[in-house]
Image (tube, rainbow, N blue to C red):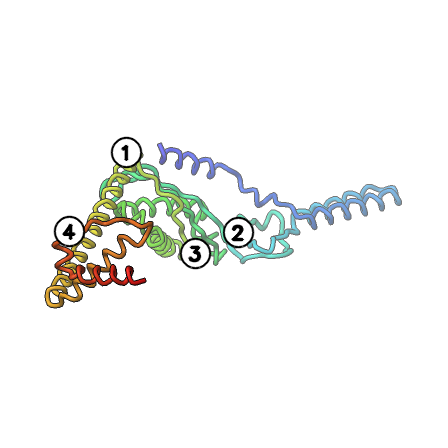
Amino acid sequence: MIYKAILKKLGDDVMKPDLSQYRISNVGVALFIVCAAAGGGITAAIGKPVPAIAGALVGLYFLFAIRVADQWEKVAVLRFGRYTGLRGPGIFHVIPVVDRLSTFVDQRVRVANVSAESTLTRDTVPVNVDAIVFWMVWSAEKSILEVQDYSQAITLSAQTALRESIGRHELAQMLAERELLGRELQRILDEKTTSWGITVQSVEIRDVQIPPALQDAMSRQAQAERERQARIILGQAETEIAEKFGQAALTYQSNPVALHLRAMNMLYEAIKEKGAMVIVPSSAVETMGLGGMLGTVSLGGVKT
């Protein structure tokens, strides 16, 4: 259906008349009015119709002979069907009936929207891709003489290249490397259109749409991957903590004083706030040598 629509559009474009031949300039219109008015005035003065007819004919000549091209435009002149050169920008003169003008070529940067619907990637995933092509005509002569409709040719070439590029990449690459895909499309199109006098400046991938069912599957996969990474990080933390405890145990084994100090510090940290009460087994008190210390503290309190 897509190709039928494209062919139908191409057929409609071929049947359209070339309106460049009827593009009348304001200068030509002004000269026609001046000549007609002058002929009419002379006719009114002398009472003969010849000046009016001559003024109308001269005005018609200027009307179709004086043309104007805008600053960003160029046009080719064909004299009896043979190319004679480019005209524009600005005012220029042609010979009516003898000379014929081609389509006016716009040399500004132009934009073409292309899309590829339900195109299979390398891993057989159907995707819809929208892209924007920025291009410009650098040689008006080649764009007129080498290709019939350069604008339509750019659009169709970009659509074909987009489909081919999608088929060469996997879905993950298309989602993560849009700039790389755009540069590849720009290179392919530029190689093809250089002979037409057209350069493709850049191609931007605007959107990549995948089926909803696949979006849900990818979301679940990403969530599972995040949970796996979280568990791996937690396991690594437990391993490092166990290693540190092992190193601490070796240190305390060879240095009992350090173990006693650590135990006292832990006891102090437990009871320093809000007058907390901690029950310590007698064996732990004897092991840490806290009996003598507590007795000393008690005697000191009695003396005070």
Residue 213: image tag: 1
- Label 4 sits on residue: 281
For marks 1 and 3, give the one nearer the viewer: 1
- Label 3 sits on residue: 201
Which element is circle 1 on? helix
Nearer-N-terminus badge (1/3): 3
- Between the C-alphas of marks 2 and 3, the distance is 18 Å
Q: Quadrant of the N terminus?
A: top left
Nearer-N-terminus badge (4/2): 2
- Front residue of 64 and 114: 114
Q: Amino acid at mark 2?
A: Val
For marks 4 and 3, give the one nearer the viewer: 4
The outermost residue toward the top is 1
Dots 2, 1 in contact, CB < 8 A: no
Nearer-N-terminus badge (2/1): 2
Residue that appears at 46% across and 56% down? 142
For marks 4 and 2, give the one nearer the viewer: 4
For marks 2 and 1, give the one nearer the viewer: 1
- Relative image position of residue 295 (x, y in whole percent): 21, 60
Q: Amino acid at mark 1?
A: Ala
Nearer-N-terminus badge (4/1): 1
Residue 105: image tag: 2
For marks 4 and 1, give the one nearer the viewer: 4
- Relative image position of residue 275 (x, y in whole percent): 31, 50
